[in-house]
Image (cartoon, rainbow, N blue to C red):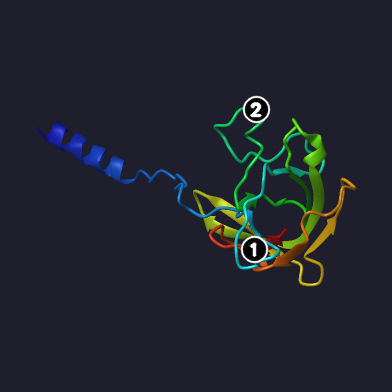
Amino acid sequence: MKKILYFLLIFTFGLSSCEKDDICDANTPTTPRLIISFYDITTPSVKKSVTLLKVMGKGQDEGIIFNESGTETTKYLTSGDSIAIPLKTNEDAATFSFILNSDESNPGLTNTDEITFNYSRQNVYVSRACGFKTIYRLDTQTPFVRTDSGNDGIWMQDVRVFNPNIEFENETHVKVFF
């Protein structure tokens, strides 16, 4: 009887010394993406959906995936009024091509603008399970540089920084008027 009690006591102390599993909760905010919302240039307070928008990072072969369940050609396209794009965690600038009407069936309607976002980075400790996340702040002097990389006219008529602090994904950081 003493042996069983002794065994149970050691077993109980052994279990109490185990640590909780370190699993990063899916709801824990991690490195945020840049949120861009699109607006009508004639009525600046009204959001406007883009048509078949494809966003590609400079030097990338494929676009940013907007539609996981889409086909190979449609998963890189979106027709919404807001998008979320990742910034680089190891550099202070990221360049993207924004391709409007990126439907290969009618290349004459396609229009490409390029924007380089300039920012500073800060690594912030989240938890032992999640590690660090990077938060960004758009440069106050030159937050972005916009060019017409396709020589087809600028479709993004006005670009404005709405919130330069990129810490969360529940707010618009940049507004594009077209």
> Which amino acid type is marked by label 2?
Glu
85 lies above or below 178:
above
Mark 1 Cα-neighbour bin, 10 Å: few <14, some 14–19, many ≥20: many
Locate residue 6, reporting x and y percent.
Answer: 18, 37
Q: Furthest residue to the bottom?
A: 141
Which residue corresponds to mark 1?
173
Q: Furthest residue to the front?
A: 42
The residue closer to the viewer here, 75 or 131, is 75
Numbered disc 1: secondary structure: loop
Mark 1 and mark 2: Cα distance apart in space: 29 Å
Q: Answer with mark 1 or mark 2, whichever residue precedes in sequence.
A: 2
Locate residue 176, reporting x and y percent.
Answer: 70, 60
Which residue corresponds to mark 2?
72
Locate residue 91, reporting x and y percent.
Answer: 77, 53
Q: Please name the residue shown 67% across and 30% down the image.
A: 73
Say whether residue 126 is left or right of residue 50: left
Q: Which mark is residue 130?
A: none
Q: Please name the residue shown 82% across and 38% down the image.
A: 108
Q: Furthest residue to the left?
A: 1
Q: Please name the residue shown 53% across and 57% down the image.
A: 126
Query: Which image quadrant for residue 99?
Result: top right
Mark 2 Cα-neighbour bin, 10 Å: few <14, some 14–19, many ≥20: few
